[in-house]
Image (cartoon, grey):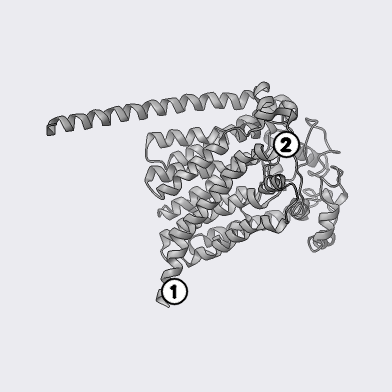
Amino acid sequence: MSEQATVAVARQTSRSFAVSRNSLCKLLGYLTGFWVAVLLLQPQWLLGTFFWGGSSAHGIDYWCIPRGFLNLLAGQSMFDTFAGVQFGGPPVTWYLGHPVFVLLVAPWFAFFRLELSLWLWSVATVVILGCVGWMFSRRASSELGKSACIFFSVFGFPALDLLSSGNMHGWLVLALALTVVGLFDLSRGVRGGRRELAAGLLISLFSKPILLFALPMLLLVRQTRKTTALVIAVYVLVSLLCVLVPWLNPASVGLQREIALFFDPAYVRGHMNVYNNHFVLTAEMKDNAIHWLNLVAQSDFYWDHIQIFSLSAFLNGLAGVQLPAMLYKLPLLAALLASFCVPLVRDETARMRAAMWATVLLLLTFFLSYNTVWEYQYTAVIPVLLLGIVLLDHGMDEGNARWLVVCGAVISLPSLYFLFGEKITIGEFAWMRSTRVLPICALYIVVACTLWRRYLWPSLKRSRQVS
């Protein structure tokens, strides 16, 4: 074949490839629109096929949020979900978010009719997920990468479960995305990364403190120390106001009693666990301090519910016995140990990239070390999946980034509940949970290996050679 013919074939191939990529971008756009419609319409047959309980628990996790604000206006505790102002439900779950979330978010939804209020909340959640995709798409380098980020930010059956339950977890997904994007930008020398990091940490702390274990590392790393310290100062000040100001905490049991509870974890676990109490709230559980005390109350609680997709539920189901609780703390302990090594990385770019991977690793420990993990909470993996797309687009950490996308995409698919339906037996729970738990385990291993082999071990090795 002549040189001219070879060039012509190469050009034709390149043109065909470009056309196929453009077609794929359009297809992803159509699929994104279709799935957004599914999220907002939430067809009952779809919910009944893929989720236990179907549409019977529609909005179960939402009603407590506007109830909290309406309770506060009526001079009652925002945590007195069941006996306070009745807005929506039943069924309804207990509010456990940060008090400031009720103050800042709930007023926008609390004064509409019930159906409209819940629908507006669903729209807001979809918009939040779309913003997550938009943030990552801005950092992708190709049109296909941008389209994939938008699509996978909203697509997934955990996202459908999130919209159906009406949980506030979408705000946490936004917080995780801002944090990861902030660290990614800082690793590339973008100054705006500090703003995104601060916003992500604040939103997480003021909704669900899943990033709590990342704070020590971020304080130790020079580039993030000032931002993290400022965030912690704001968080502590606002939290103290929510506990000490009588109007914000009308059911307070008193500062002395609150302090005593923090130093008596055995009492908290024995008397303040909402599940053990059969959803009967004691006076101490209506104090705003319960937002923090509940972390202690449920720290060792185990419940083999069909909708729980934790590692402990999966392995205990396979073994047929309840394995030692300490076994499930090992992933968290290992991730914490790795995060404390991040400040030892000498190169600033590598250190920030290591901090990003360590934050992702600590996020994944929630699914492995915490006992009560609901299916909708797997939407927290969305930022990890999108990070993989962006890294692939830039050709960075390509081999491992591919696993982030693959595992994240598998988690987006439905669980195996649809194979069994409502007749599912306890022995079949493990099979149903496998498509959630096994990809998370794979992600944890991939991220841990990336952090260790690319950043921590080379740095430690160099330090030993210098010494």
Where is residue 355 drawn, in percent x and y?
50, 57
- Looking at the figure, which quarter contains the N terminus? top left
Distance Cα–Cα, label 2 vs label 1: 52 Å
Quadrant the C terminus occupies: bottom left
Against 371, residue 73 (above or below) is above
Question: Which residue does the image show at 38% across and 45% down from the upper left?
Answer: 394
Q: Nearer the viewer, residue 311 or 462?
A: 311
Q: Name the residue under label 1.
A: 464
Residue kind at label 2, given as amino acid type: Asp
Q: Which residue is at the front of the view, 349 or 195?
A: 349
Q: Which of marks 2 and 1 is nearer the N terminus?
A: 2
Please, what secondary structure does the residue beneath circle 1 have?
helix
Quick check: can you spot residue 196?
A: no
Q: At label 1, which amino acid type do we have?
A: Arg
Total numbered labels: 2
349 relative position to 433: left or right: left
- In this image, 300 relative to 23: left or right? right
Q: Quadrant of residue 161?
A: top right
| Residue occupied by mark 2 | 61
Q: Do the residues labelled 2 and 1 touch (CB within 8 Å)?
A: no
